[in-house]
């Protein structure tokens, strides 16, 4: 069977090549049509090519199928029920296994208008050919917490898959209410434990995630962890404002990632960018409710952290507790550098612009420590709108490692409901360009003659 299949394929290719060249033969120019007839010859030639394509479509189709077509692996063909009640995890696993070992480009398909109940699952690569996860229906997380025992940190986990595309307009629903209720942030008597991330992309290179809705995650919604060359667009990420730790899009140890044209409203950070991330772009992002776009936290438990080359360009924040934030713990080391926040509009945001080098997200107060994650070269440009509180610009930098190279350019932030906003500026080396409202209070500002900018001190 295999041998005769290959033989037919071989003959098809030979026939196709022969037909192709004989049909194109008239396209080569002959002396007589060189000048005047050139155009006519070309037209005729193209007609011939068109005829050839249609007349011999069987041959073309054959070659096409053999060389570039995709094969679809539909979870329904592996006995998924899609009624939102039956556990369809087995069907997902089988369909994935076959899709991933397909020699042809494969489509792992979750059909629309159905709801598939799924327990934690790993979509493990590497796969043989390029793969598309076409998620058009809803994938709903099981709330049976015992099913998460083996790995409490992940629900849908994609590992080491290169050339992956995830799309389809469907929904990934973490069904997270039970986790929120049991969170130590909600129920203070409970110990603090990690809850699963709804969708984790781990060690994926050349990844496209487009046109999906991710909602009600147990904890983080989408995490890009140790990935390279990523485009994530047209994502809608939604969870209630009071759901604990439900970051929208989390970027860790990931390089060359562009997140664009997306809407995120959750109970925690809209986008969080942490250690090991470089070359991160967020363009055209709408945030709110939630905690805004955040670099960090970095340097907890004396960790070394590096984040650089981050560009947030075009964002709209509404009702968030922060706008653009950099947060680091005392006692860490490393740096956050080359960061630009530009073309941003804020409506009723509590801390529109904030650097906090004394971040402390724990019950006990954090002790003063000598080292810090250094913050260098941060540009804020064309940021307008309103602050929910008086302090719209907050730089709380470390005494020992002041924030360096901070630029405020064309800033106009006022208080929601009217009134001037203020700036808090501790230990920051700051330059103003153009109109900047509000500015640091005069009494703490020194002009550094050598650098020609303002250096503020505690
Ligand atoms: C973006 O998502 C919306 C909603 O799912 C969809 O209607 C639209 O076609 C998507 N656009 C692109 C460019 O994928
Ligand atoms: C941060 O990332 C660096 C590599 O960039 C790594 O060496 C370090 O261990 C990471 N720190 C933590 C706390 O993960
Ligand atoms: C930040 O940018 C400066 C100037 O472009 C460059 O010299 C430096 O290497 C960059 N830092 C990092 C960590 O990429
Ligand atoms: C400033 O940012 C706003 C978005 O908040 C944008 O619409 C506007 O075009 C930007 N202005 C310039 C001069 O880039
Ligand atoms: C602005 O935000 C504050 C605090 O989040 C809230 O209490 C207030 O109602 C908001 N105002 C408007 C006009 O939305
Ligand atoms: C700053 O914004 C306020 C409120 O939108 C506006 O009234 C004011 O004219 C702006 N100032 C400048 C200098 O653009």
Image: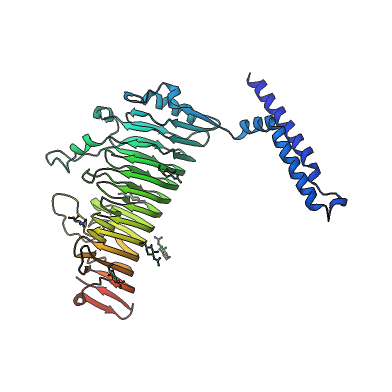
Q: Quadrant of the C terminus?
A: bottom left
- State the residue lying farthest toward the top: 1
Ligand 1 occupies quarter: top left
Could one spot residue 74 in this view of the protein?
yes
Q: Nearer the viewer, residue 334 or 152?
A: 152
On screen, residue 228 versus residue 61, left or right, reads: left
- State the residue lying farthest toward the right: 32
Identify which residue is drawn at 48% across, 26% down: 98
Identify which residue is drawn at 42% across, 51% down: 258
Identify which residue is drawn at 23% across, 55% down: 321
Q: Quadrant of the N terminus?
A: top right
- Residue 441 in picture, x, y percent from top left: 21, 74
- Residue 276 in picture, x, y percent from top left: 36, 51
Residue 345, picture quadrant: bottom left
Could one spot residue 354 in this view of the protein?
no
Residue 381, picture quadrant: bottom left
- State the residue lying farthest toward the left: 189
* Vertical order, 85 against 216 (above or below): above
- Residue 5 in picture, x, y percent from top left: 65, 23
* Vertical order, 62 against 311 (above or below): above
Q: How many marks?
A: 0
């Amino acid at each position: 069977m295999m041998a005769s299949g290959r033989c037919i394929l071989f003959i098809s290719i030979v026939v196709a090549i022969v037909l192709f060249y004989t049909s194109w033969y008239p396209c080569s120019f002959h002396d007589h049509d060189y000048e005047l007839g050139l155009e006519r010859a070309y037209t005729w030639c193209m007609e011939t090519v068109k005829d050839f394509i249609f007349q011999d479509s069987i041959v073309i189709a054959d070659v096409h199928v053999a060389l570039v077509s995709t094969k679809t692996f539909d979870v329904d063909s592996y006995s998924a029920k899609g009624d939102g009640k039956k556990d369809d995890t087995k069907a997902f696993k089988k369909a994935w296994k076959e899709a991933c070992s397909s020699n042809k480009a494969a489509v792992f398909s979750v059909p629309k208008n159905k709801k598939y109940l799924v327990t934690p699952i790993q979509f493990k690569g590497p796969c043989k050919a390029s793969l598309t996860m076409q998620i058009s229906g809803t994938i709903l997380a099981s709330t049976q917490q015992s099913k998460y025992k083996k790995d409490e940190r992940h629900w849908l986990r994609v590992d080491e898959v290169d050339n992956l595309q995830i799309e389809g307009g469907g929904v990934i629903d973490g069904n997270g209410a039970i986790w929120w209720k049991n969170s130590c942030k909600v129920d203070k008597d409970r110990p603090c434990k990690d809850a699963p991330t709804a969708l984790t992309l781990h060690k994926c290179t050349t990844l496209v995630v487009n046109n999906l809705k991710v909602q009600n995650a147990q904890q983080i919604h989408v995490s890009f962890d140790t990935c390279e060359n990523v485009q994530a667009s047209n994502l809608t990420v939604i969870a209630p404002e009071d759901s604990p730790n439900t970051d929208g899009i989390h970027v860790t140890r990931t390089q060359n990632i562009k997140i664009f044209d997306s809407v995120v409203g959750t109970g925690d950070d809209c986008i969080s960018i942490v250690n090991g991330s470089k070359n991160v772009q967020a363009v055209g992002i709408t945030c709110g409710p939630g905690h805004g776009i955040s670099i960090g936290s970095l340097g907890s438990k004396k960790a070394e952290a590096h984040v650089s080359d981050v560009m947030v360009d075009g964002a709209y924040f509404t009702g968030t507790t922060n706008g653009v934030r950099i947060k680091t713990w005392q006692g860490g080391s490393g740096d956050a550098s080359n960061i630009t926040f530009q073309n941003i509009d804020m409506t009723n945001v509590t801390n529109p612009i904030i650097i906090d080098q004394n971040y402390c997200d724990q019950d006990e107060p954090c002790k003063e420590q000598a080292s810090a994650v250094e913050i260098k070269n941060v540009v804020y440009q064309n940021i307008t709108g309103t602050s929910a509180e008086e302090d719209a610009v907050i730089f709380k930098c470390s005494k020992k490692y002041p924030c360096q190279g901070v630029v405020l350019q064309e800033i106009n932030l006022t208080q929601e409901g009217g009134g001037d906003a203020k700036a808090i500026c501790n230990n920051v080396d700051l330059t103003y360009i153009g109109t900047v409202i509000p500015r640091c209070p005069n009494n703490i500002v020194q002009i550094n003659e050598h650098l020609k900018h303002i250096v503020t001190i505690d």
